[in-house]
Image (tube, helix red, strand yellow):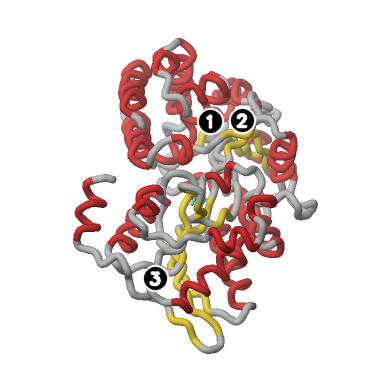
Amino acid sequence: MTKMMKSLLAGTALTALSASVVLADGAELEVTHWWTSGGEAIAVGKLADAWQAAGNTWIDGAIAGSGGTARPIIISRILGGDPMAATQLNHGRQAEELIEAGLLLDLTEVAEANNWAEIINPSSLLEACTLDGRIYCAPLNIHSAQWMWLSHGAYEKAGLDVPANWNDFVASAPALQEAGIVPLAMGQQGWQQNIAFGTITIAIAGVDNWLAVNRDKNIDVATGPEYTAVFEAVAAARALAADSNVQDWNLATNMVITDTAGAQIMGDWAQGEFQVAGEVAGTDYSCLPGLGLNAVLDTGGDAFYFPVIDDDATRAAQLEMAAMLVSPEVQVDFNLAKGSLPVRGDIDLSSANACMQKGLEILASGNGILPSGDMNLSADTQTQVEDLMAEFWSSDMSAADAQAAYVSIISRAD
Ligand code: GAL
């Protein structure tokens, strides 16, 4: 447990009283999340609608900014005895310490009653919710990070075909620049730059080398020539994003939507923004999983956790919400709006757009399905890599210095 958590816990009554109210005619639960972009707000509205349709009240606790801003707020509220009734986190290791401290509700009974062990696909999603055989989260969706989104309008202006992969994209950059277009849109935040780093790694060094470093913490591979090529490619990407001056990821997506940038490397939640803007996959924009070089997807995404609250009726309502999130109706409505893939394989998503279909195909093939960064690395290690990326992308740090700093982080990772 981190020092911060220990000191916060020391002053905390572990059985927090509820910030939620259960009324005779339904439950009122506060739900925190960081879904505040246009597309995200529509998607979370689907969850609220379903909860309210069942006679309950959804108190929306949206936290502006990225997950990096929201997570410490969420975690310190839980540690500080002021828990929300339900919260988004990424499934993976983010909640590990909260579970160990006994602060999150055990959902095993709801998981068993709804047969999650059979229906959650891939099973790694449920494993990421499980500690010592007990289940502590409801997986909601699969969001993968390894995508490049390309503007057809930008390429039309530059008189070029839309690239089919990362190498074509890099070759196209001078023509984009001549046409006054920023080749690569990039929000100036470490988590976004880290997504680009991870995605470029898989495309350039390949899945096995990525797994060797991220999953197995293999220092020889992290120091080796394949990773040197990765850091050089990331330095080249940095140059292509030099004129991208936005912060938030959705503002970078907006550069692609408005054809002021050629492309963005971002998770598939970007689809929600294209959808809200009325853009059509395959016509107005294209998507390249694995940068068109290695079609993979990681099984990151979102899961809901329910803090322990000392009130039986609230607890019953929390279990009801957990079951609702995995239900077929919510899985269809939410994921179509969010651009994410469902956590169950038994539902019909044939109305999904061309990009979501690519994701569904990779998932169905069973090949190229990877654990997410949050599954491989502890929250502390993730933050260290994101901080390194923030420094690298905002300075002229050399590729070699960045690689050395990265090797040092991985050598200390748990
Ligand atoms: C991720 C989350 C997505 C999306 C994205 C940007 O962590 O899994 O659902 O919200 O952040 O906000």
Please tell me whether mark 2 sits on a helix, a strand or a loop: helix
Residue highlighted by disc 1:
199
- The residue lying toward the viewer, choosing from 197 and 242, is 197
Residue highlighted by disc 3:
309
116 relative to 412, above or below: below
- 83 sits to left or right of 328: left
- 13 sits to left or right of 304: left
Q: Quadrant of the C terminus?
A: top left
- Number of dots carrying numbers: 3
39 relative to 316, above or below: above
- The residue lying toward the viewer, choosing from 16 and 196, is 16
Please tell me whether mark 1 sits on a helix, a strand or a loop: helix
- Which amino acid, by three-letter code, is at mark 2? Gly
Of the image marks 1 and 3, the number of the one nearer the N terminus: 1
Residue depicted at x 57% and y 30%: 176
Q: Which residue is farthest top?
A: 225
Q: Position of residue 196 (x, y in %)?
A: 49, 33
Query: Does the Cβ of the disc 2 residue fall within 8 Å of ligand 1?
Result: no
- 226 sits to left or right of 363: left
> Contact, CB < 8 Å: mark 1 with mark 2?
yes
Query: Does the Cβ of the disc 1 residue fall within 8 Å of ligand 1?
Result: no
Residue highlighted by disc 2:
290
Label 1 to label 3: alpha-carbon separation: 39 Å
- The residue lying toward the viewer, choosing from 185 and 165, is 165
Of the image marks 1 and 2, the number of the one nearer the N terminus: 1
Is residue 89 at all visible to an observer of this figure? yes
Of the image marks 3 and 2, the number of the one nearer the N terminus: 2
Closer mark to the observer between disc 3 and disc 2: 3
Q: In which quarter of the view is residue 391 placed? A: top left
Q: Position of residue 108 (x, y in %)?
A: 54, 58
Is residue 186 at all visible to an observer of this figure? no
Q: Residues within 10 Å of mark 3 (few under 14, many from 20)?
A: many
